Image (cartoon, grey):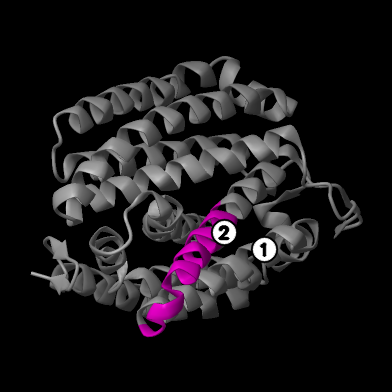
Amino acid sequence: MIDLTVIWALIIAFAVFMYVVMDGFDLGIGILFPAFAPGEERDQAMNAIAPVWDGNETWLVLGGGGLLAAFPLAYAIILPATYPLIIAMMLGLVFRGVAFEFRWRDPRHRAFWDMAFFGGSLVAALAQGITLGALLQGIHVEGRAYAGGWLDWLSPYSLLTGIGVVAGYSLLGACWLALKVEGSAEDKAFGFARKAAWATILLMGSVSLATPFLAGQYFQRWFTEPMIYWLAPVPLITGAVAFALLRSLGKKHAWRPFMLTLAIFLLGMVGLGVSMWPWVVPQSVSIWDAAAPHRSQVFMLIGVGIVMPLILAYTGWAYWVFRGKVGSHGYH
């Protein structure tokens, strides 16, 4: 018999991964934005994501809405535990969206809107990373409800994951710009990508080393037999991909750095899945404990089966139409 709960867990994981890699690169461009010169360089950076930035956030709606619908108990626990972070993330996303539109229509205050775009991007990325750390370090649950305080999410570990996500998004954004822009902006993008790659590799390694010591479950999953033999290829492959990324950036390849960065994020997602499985709230609530009734899962699966192919189709079409290099006045 097919376990719909597992299928829904995979759907949510896929939506989260799609959001991280797709909205991640335009958040990363926002984080790097002040480093580009006002005028043509910043206009190119904006135009590189103009056709796709709002569509990329569709995956956030699918991931968050899917969590509420398929795992309502997890939603009811995770949201109260991270309310300050979720509020900060949403305000950051809203503010950067407003800034994105107003910088073109309000030239007199363009410097202000440019900084607003940077600030909203940085806050959103940092909040997402800290939320990940808060989830991994554990949430205090009593009687199927959150029983912690307003700032339980704040810790050295969650700050480390927050900074790691900022670095990773910056890497994604720099690699996307290196692929899309021209001239001095392209040269700067490659330079930022090399620095962000080193930062991402070091921070990813630090988080990977710290996570097994958060809870016995993580340590046993990674360092006890026979799992250690099955999982050893994950960090080894990640190291090989990171080495290939640094070489590719040094040679200023076009597509290869971006694709290798996506591979690093995918391997990181695999590592998170291995560590957390089968908990949706680590140490407290499993996916089966948090799952919606079977009939609800079936009903929602029909809707996702219709909607998700449409999202993938229009996303692919948008990227195909706006392929190629972009200048300060639009696509060539």
Residue at 20 percent of width and 42 percent of height: 187
Q: Where does residue 155 sit, x and y in percent of width and height? A: 76, 37
Quick check: 311 left or right of 274? left
Q: Is residue 277 above or below residue 293?
A: above
The magenta stretch is: 105-125
Residue toward you, 119 or 50: 119
Q: Quadrant of the C terminus?
A: bottom left
Give yes or no for residue 124 being in the magenta stretch.
yes
Q: Farthest residue toward the left?
A: 332
Residue at 47 percent of width and 74 percent of height: 99
Give yes or no for residue 122 being in the magenta stretch.
yes
> Can you see residue 186?
yes
Distance, label 2 to label 1, CA atoms, is 7 Å
Residue 88 is tagged as: 1
> To which residue does mark 2 refer?
124
Residue toward you, 164 or 2: 164
Magenta segment's dominant SS is: helix
Q: Is residue 312 above or below residue 146?
A: below
